[in-house]
Image (cartoon, rainbow, N blue to C red):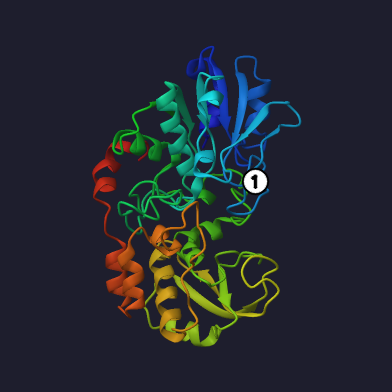
Amino acid sequence: MRTGLERLLDDPKRWLGQARVGLVANPTTIDRRFNHGVDLLHAHADVDLRLLFGPEHGIRGAAQDMVEIPEAREPLTGLPEISLYGETVESLSPSGEHLSRIDVLIFDVQDVGARYYTYAATMALCMRAAKEAKLKVIVLDRPNPLGGIQIEGGGVQPGLESVCGLYPVPQRHALTVGELAWLYNDSFGIGCELDVVPCEGWCRDHYYDACHLPWVMPSPNMPTLDTALVYPGMCLLEGTNLSEGRGTTRPFELFGAPFIDGRALALELGRYDLSGVLFRPCVIEPTFHKFARQRCGALQLHVMDRLAFNSFRTGLAVLIAVRKLWPDELAWRTQPYEFRDDVPAIDLLTGNVAVREAIDGGESLDTVSEIASSGTQAYDAGRAKALLYD
């Protein structure tokens, strides 16, 4: 199969004409031989590349989560690098001054198929800014690593919007970024001038390892496809005082805390009828982030059947089980999260205040899952119109 970047490079004039171009990029902006899109577009005689924009983690992907990215110059091309992830909400969108220097804004960043992953929010904010500036946006599509069939989770209640959920899209949304762009533009009313260069040869039942494309870490804590498989559920732990495995070599697959007894937790989760996954008790000692250099009781998720596995339900089960076994130790994160400090982080991640309340109230996994899977009416209504692939 071929990505949108590779297809655009076949005939740039078809898509770009004589336009001055800006590019939103990170380390995943590559062709199948690992050539970076910045170099390919800058060297192409038919492309007038003027500005580079970097999402969370930066154009080189070196920064950890929720870290401000400074502006710089790309060392080989000398092009300005504009950060789209700074200290304020305003920094998440390109400015009118920057957009006045270009005619077309290209977005080419690999998503991982989960609503919380901030790159799709960066794309949406770029589309909003482009609408105001009367600028065209072109999305170079890439496969959804988790395929395009299985949907997990629920929407986002009004008032809980953030860069981990700008729109009421499920946690595992089963769309490519190109399809998300059409959904945002049409069903959620952005209304910018938009074009998508689709992938060639991608099918909805293809996980990333069926695409014969190189995997480059989309962010520092997304090292493998295995990480992406568990992320739609295990990212919920960012809203708690549990370590989600940052500072270990298997983030989101490993999780724990000093107060956790891994064997007891594995036994409890074994009662929840979670398909396609096994839990291995272990011990972790994160090198940074939560509980750095502290010994933590932990579990590792081992996905045995990816088609049967439901990551979001599994993440909810972990929260329910830990609340049941260690009710006084488990705490919801109260520090600012993704530029918001007025609501608990877990509410931004679930998109629904009632999920936290149900977990605290001791409700069953089925009840919590039903609450957490609500609120997708707008997504359900618009999804079919946004689909680009069979």
Is 319 placed above or below 171 here?
below
Is 330 placed above or below 207 here?
below
Residue 200 visible, this angle: no
Q: Of 317 and 52, which appears nearest the observer? A: 52
Residue 38 in the figure: left or right of residue 112: right
Query: What residue would you read off at disc 1?
Result: 61
Q: Residue at x 51, y 77 (%)?
A: 279
| Residue found at the far front of this picture | 342
Residue 12 visible, this angle: yes
Q: Of 34 and 128, which appears nearest the observer? A: 128
Query: What x and y, as percent, mark residue 32?
Result: 62, 37
Residue 348 in the figure: left or right of residue 105: left
Amino acid type, mark 1 = Gly
Q: Quadrant of residue 349?
A: bottom left
Q: Residue at x 33, y 72 (%)?
A: 357
Query: What x and y, as percent, mark residue 1?
Result: 51, 37
| Residue found at the far right of this picture | 75
Q: Of 37 and 31, which appears nearest the observer? A: 37
Q: Quadrant of residue 160?
A: bottom left
Q: Quadrant of the C terminus?
A: top left
Q: Quadrant of residue 35?
A: top right
Query: What x and y, as percent, mark residue 211?
Result: 52, 45
Disc 1, SS = loop
Residue 287 in the figure: left or right of residue 90: right
